[in-house]
Image (spheres, coloured by chain):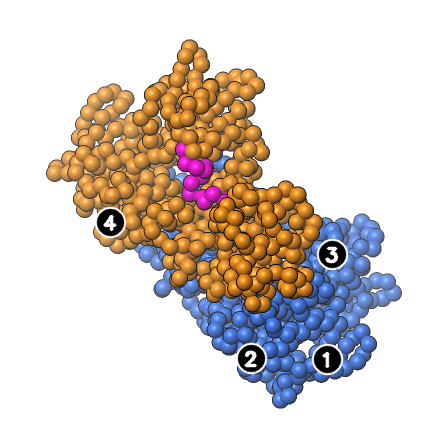
Chain colours: A orange, B blue
Amino acid sequence: MKYVIIGGVAGGASAAARLKRIQEDAEIVILEKGEHISYANCGMPYYIGNTIEERKKLFVQTPVSFGNRYDADVRTLNEVTAIHRDRKTVSVKNLRNGKEYEEAYDILLLSPGAEPIIPPVPGTDLPNIFTLRNVSDCDRIKAAAAQSLCDGTEAVIIGGGFIGLEMAENLHKLGYRVTVVEKADHILTPLDWPMAAIVQQHLADKSVRVITGNGLAAFQQEGDALSVTLDDGTTLPCRLAILSIGVRPNTRLAEACGLKIGEAKGIWVNEFLQTSDECIFAVGDAIEYPHPITGKPYCNFLAGPANLQARIAAMNMVYPQTVRYQGSVTTAIAKIFDLTAASTGLSENMLKKHNIEYQTVIVHPAAHATYYPGGSQIHLKLNFHPQNGMILGAQAVGTQNVDKQIDAISLIMKHQGTIFDLVNSEHAYAPPYGSAKSPVMFAGMVAENIMAHLMNPIQAAELDELLDKKEDINLLDVREIQEFKTGTIEGAGNYPVDELREFLDDIDPDKKTVVFCEVGLRGYVASRILMQSGFEEVYNLVGGMKTYRLVGRHFEKK
Amino acid sequence: MKYVIIGGVAGGASAAARLKRIQEDAEIVILEKGEHISYANCGMPYYIGNTIEERKKLFVQTPVSFGNRYDADVRTLNEVTAIHRDRKTVSVKNLRNGKEYEEAYDILLLSPGAEPIIPPVPGTDLPNIFTLRNVSDCDRIKAAAAQSLCDGTEAVIIGGGFIGLEMAENLHKLGYRVTVVEKADHILTPLDWPMAAIVQQHLADKSVRVITGNGLAAFQQEGDALSVTLDDGTTLPCRLAILSIGVRPNTRLAEACGLKIGEAKGIWVNEFLQTSDECIFAVGDAIEYPHPITGKPYCNFLAGPANLQARIAAMNMVYPQTVRYQGSVTTAIAKIFDLTAASTGLSENMLKKHNIEYQTVIVHPAAHATYYPGGSQIHLKLNFHPQNGMILGAQAVGTQNVDKQIDAISLIMKHQGTIFDLVNSEHAYAPPYGSAKSPVMFAGMVAENIMAHLMNPIQAAELDELLDKKEDINLLDVREIQEFKTGTIEGAGNYPVDELREFLDDIDPDKKTVVFCEVGLRGYVASRILMQSGFEEVYNLVGGMKTYRLVGRHFEKK
């Protein structure tokens, strides 16, 4: 059997290796238009920032080493220009000598990846405007970035997603003054605002400028002077700019040969990763697949799922329709200076877009037992269905153990798990690694309390609406007096939770009552006391002052 | 409703807090025989070793602060001496003044914990022989340990479990020469030998002496000289010794009042955590509960499950039989010097004891992308059912991300998950946090290959048996020549995998063939080439040389 693979990076190379292991007499041809196969895209920002010092470390395999091990015919700088499904061949152009030829296949695998989105604005082709997708991009950015800097040499990142922020950190590390421009109202849109706000604050602390709600209008060059103009007319002079507003599936070849393209504009595949032509499979960034939570087609641009798809496709290419792909809940993570930010599943914006009802909790538990040295806080937001408790998404930010929490939720979500599964989850606990209640258990317990009507949540934005309307409510800060004095919410009175029972007669039980503390736990205890003492309508502020300070609009300094 | 709670540490205090939050008018009496409630047992070794500097950090709540917040009557130094189920009261002795009284209950919760096992050997009551279970034990050990040391002052730990090794590290940190004595054939029996061997090696590197397969015979004191005598007559002089051979459920009160004690010798409870008396609930270290994997009653002595049980019991105490406990798969972890060792589910010894068929894989993947700096290896062992793929247990050792792997497997196991769930798992990947294939995916993939008969595993111990019998086999080291020269297995020939196809004619395909590499991946590739080239019976050494060097008996230096 002869297998031809278009694209030799993550998906293509993994599939080839698996194919050969399953079928030693398989004839495998890998056609890669670039110079390299099987390289570490995800490492490129770190190579640019000199965190990874040696360029060769980016290469997992060379064409020769891979060819030797897997007895595969690896042809780099060979670009496929067309697929001829009728005669089961592909047209190939050898970029080394310009010669064209046709290559026959029994089974074809498409792993063409994704390509950066270039917005239709002037100047995107100027020399110091870059996208980062392959090794050549990486080399070009590294060369441009490495030129000697004077104090305050500027770099602009267009797009505040995971990769944009990785680039921001790495250019900052090289000495640049970095500005991140994001068209949406906050950076890191896979995260909701209360979580993204923590990252935005951290970037400000690191002297990275963040401009949100403002899109790219043009790049200009006058003489040596490059600048970026934004929608509102702001001009940002810079040495270089990175365009990092996203990628789109590379479907050119698939479309040209009439393969089905789906509603998310990726190559359509079935659960066996077969395209609309049963002899052609597709994997990686170029495909779309139903999202397990929404059921709707979705394009993930993630290395983990691509790798798994390659393994599954290879099996099905040899033994037709034996292994099913289960889709991805979209789990992603990035290091952003001292912080880790991670997400899985759907953000509030996505949930609204899909008309999915949701409730949300925010907790700020300790990353490990507070009595053990070297601890920190994790900020964890959980979006769940208020009727059935199904987990819809989660996001976490912090300096330690963030990955562990999101991995746990991702695993549970993948099985259509609920917040009750979080409550009943089990984790490895000793003081250096966590607490007896893990952050995900803790978030699950808060969600369970909401579902059991033990607690009514109010989000910071909802409270701000009440305050904007000047509604007549009881607003109770149940922290200690020392904490109250560091600042509170406008109009709040101080009723420390441990004394609250003594002051119940001073508060009007018929008014709507909102309680809050620093993170939400004492607020919960206070709300329980009030709810069981004749108070009609009691709400506890989700995430407490810790969240409100970042995203609330009625914070009052004392 | 009046709730009486016996025991105010983890389970008791958590249950009281939850009780009050769900029922503000609950009358709650906590009877604790010790001086403290709600303290951090798990932190005590670190307080002894000065990692935790302030004693007060061990106390999560004081009786007063807890009483204030939860409007509970907290009586420390009040020991319950009997339960009178007929008249629903308990007899209590106030240890402060010696007075005895009876306290009535509507609902009773038992949270008496576990007590250290004291072996029936001479000298266990000598002054410098300690067990570590409560704050008084901790204070005594700290006082004894803090006396000035001379070079080489010795301490002996009897019992090489998680807590014994935490104590070994902390006494070593104080300057002691530490010996760990373990009766079983290796330390850390929740881990199988190939994993425990890594920890044993690490302890040796840290100059901690480990004696295995040798039990405690006696403690002796002559004048100031304390010593420990072992079964084989070895005598170990020491300043102090810690008895850490395990704990047993404290069932004294429960037994005396006729509550059902189960086959694992813990207090029997149903899924609502009710004892055989419907007005008496029990949680924590004193209970037994069916293990989700074996279905057999099991005593877990773990803080996480105790906490969860408290939450569940409290709900059922107020709203009868509403929330079910799902059991614990026994997930545990410890920091042991620079290493982390963790386990979940069943070890091989446990599996044999329960007559459960199993297969095992060992992998040594990178803790994060190898091209990103600061990496290390994780050693991960997965025990699974060879027919249905159900995960039966897992263990991991390493310096980074060990907790994350075991948490992931624990979560999947808890839902009776299989190795296929590991393969299809999704995790948050970026180079600082992991690899596109996570260690658990990787272990799952190897297990999947075994189940699909793509690979036949052979364990180090099985290979040693063949070599002991001098069976005539092909033994192929498929690593590079440079690696082969650093030492191999006796009788192995060197056939680097990338050249193996050229040398197939030199190897007898009718003989049993065992291949191995450094960690198992190249061995797998080689075994696939051989299996598909007419070789009858091909095995790949599980865990490769990395495991064999630690546990194999036929290692040959070159």
Question: Mark 4 belongs to which subunit?
Answer: A
The dot on residue B92 is: 1
Q: Residue at x 63, y 42 (%)?
A: A557
Segment tinted magenta in the rendering: A182-195
Q: Are marks 3 and 2 in contact (CB under 8 Å)?
A: no
Q: Which residue is mark 2?
A: B275
Q: Secondary structure at mark 4?
A: loop
Q: Secondary structure at mark 3?
A: helix
- Classify residue A193 as left or right of residue A515: left
Q: Earlier in the sequence, mark 1 or mark 2?
A: 1
Same chain, labels 2 and 4: no
The extreme right residue here reads B223
Q: Earlier in the sequence, mark 1 or mark 3?
A: 3
Query: Amino acid type of disc 4?
Result: Asn
Query: Amino acid type of disc 2?
Result: Thr
Q: Residue at x 61, y 60 (%)?
A: A507
What is the spatial separation of the Cα atoms under label 1 and label 2, in whole angstroms?
21 Å
Tag 3: Cα neighbours inside 10 Å, few (<14), some, or many (≥20)? few
Could you tell me residue A513's position as x and y percent?
A: 55, 58
Q: Which residue is mark 3?
A: B56
What is the spatial separation of the Cα atoms under label 3 and label 2, in whole angstroms?
35 Å
Question: Mark 1 belongs to which subunit?
Answer: B
What is the spatial separation of the Cα atoms under label 2 and label 4, in whole angstroms?
52 Å
Query: Amino acid type of disc 1?
Result: Val
Same chain, labels 3 and 2: yes
- Classify residue A199 as left or right of residue A258: right
Q: Which residue is mark 4?
A: A270
